[in-house]
Image (cartoon, coloured by chain):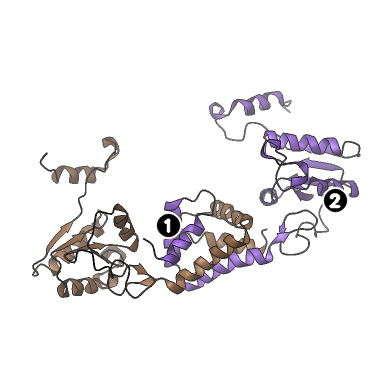
Chain colours: A purple, B brown
């Protein structure tokens, strides 16, 4: 029904998460309306991302160089390492602008049910980095979930013999949330992790 | 904060309608995860759409040839012409599979407030086509709106001297709609256009 080139573009947009037939159609039609310059920019961006973007050899985050901007920054605090589950988390923390240590990006979280084992997320690279580094604190910043817990416990166990404190980000009721919409597990966690009012 | 290639791709996705920073980020990250074959397919689709896709010289719909598939189909009913406001409407009607006439795609609708006049939507091409053709009925299939009404009345007036009936698609309460959520103008229209129960 659609001309072939239009059909192909619609199919391409459907590769994106959460994009179904209707949204893909709307997007493809909007590409037709774009001026030539923007279309070139768009197609080039896609080509470039595969050509230029790679993983930082040290922290595994996304970069266009051998080392990412953070790993090559001599001014950051060498005593703290924040371990995250994906490159996007690095951006989220950097946006806050309050963390000045280094990062390490795993390729996901341990999930035995999905067949994802420690070697699949290259945990040994993290362990080696910690063993060879001078970190005083390792912050585990995974999403609160069974997979996050499993990965945290696994890392803690392996580096337990080192003189490094292992912490994890707090889990609880998010700011501004309506209490009635908080799920039971979160509420339970928030209660058991209660703090003194200071 | 993002590597340049990733930033460019995020900007590109923001060209799409309804895509803001967060969605664009999510989409750009998903492109990184795609295999090379899909990434090539995606970038090629965008390049091809500007290279191959053009307007049908007769009906102004999208095609990769001189004439679109519908205009070059000898089996369709030459006595009915359905006038629509954009190429997407052609697809919507074709999907229904109940209309077997020809189409004519305008470049939008007349909207004096937005400075869109009859010449801006190439209405003369439609008028010429009707004058030189053997159509018995012209169906106006625009969205119910001031612009749709204006365009319909304008076309009707210009071809009033021809022996062609001019109809428009029905407007009213959509199937399955809750009456309480129908706006006043739609309800008013549905009441005044009421039909005998047969």
Relative horizontal placement of residue A135, taking residue A56 as reference (left or right) = right
Screen quadrant of the N terminus of chain A: bottom left
Secondary structure at badge 1 equals helix
Q: Give whichever of discs 1 and 2 has the lower sequence position.
A: 1
Report if the CB atoms under discs 1 and 2 are less than 8 Å apart. no
Q: Residue at x 78, y 63 (%)?
A: A66
Can marks 1 and 2 be said to lie on one chain? yes
Q: Pointer 1 indicates a residue of which chain? A: A
Q: Position of residue B47 (x, y in %)?
A: 51, 70
Looking at the picture, tell me which residue is in the foreground, A197 or B8.
Answer: B8
Image mark for residue A25: 1
Which is in the foreground here, disc 1 or disc 2? 1
Q: From what the image shows, is residue A40 above or below residue B94? A: below
Q: Position of residue A49 (x, y in %)?
A: 64, 63
Residue placed at 43% from the left, 65% from the top?
A: A4
| Label 2 chain ID | A
A109 to B166, vertically: above or below: above
* Residue shown at 82% from the left, 57% from the top: A75
Q: Which numbered tag is attached to residue A78? A: 2
| Towards the viewer: A5 or A164 | A5
Residue A110 to residue A43: above or below: above
Residue B24's image quarter? bottom right
Q: Is residue A100 visible?
A: no
Residue B15 percent across, percent down from the top left: 49, 62
Q: Quadrant of residue B140?
A: bottom left
């Amino acid at each position: 029904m659609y001309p072939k080139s239009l059909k192909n573009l619609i199919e391409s947009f459907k590769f994106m998460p959460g994009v179904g037939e209707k949204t893909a159609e709307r997007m493809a039609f909007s590409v037709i309306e774009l001026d030539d310059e923007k279309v070139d920019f768009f197609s080039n961006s896609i080509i470039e991302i595969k050509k230029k973007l790679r993983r930082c050899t040290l922290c595994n985050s996304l970069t266009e160089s051998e080392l990412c901007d953070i790993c090559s920054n001599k001014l950051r605090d060498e005593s703290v390492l924040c371990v995250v589950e994906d490159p996007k988390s690095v951006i989220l923390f950097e946006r806050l602008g309050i963390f000045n240590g280094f990062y390490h990006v795993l390729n996901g979280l341990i999930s035995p049910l999905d067949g994802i084992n420690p070697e699949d997320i290259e945990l040994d690279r993290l362990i080696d980095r910690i063993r060879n580094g001078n970190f005083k604190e390792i912050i585990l910043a995974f999403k609160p979930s069974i997979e996050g817990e499993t990965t945290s416990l696994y890392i803690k166990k392996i580096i337990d013999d080192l003189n490094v404190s292992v912490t994890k980000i707090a889990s609880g009721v998010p700011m501004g949330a309506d209490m009635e919409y908080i799920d039971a597990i979160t509420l339970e966690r928030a209660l058991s992790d209660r703090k003194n009012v200071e």
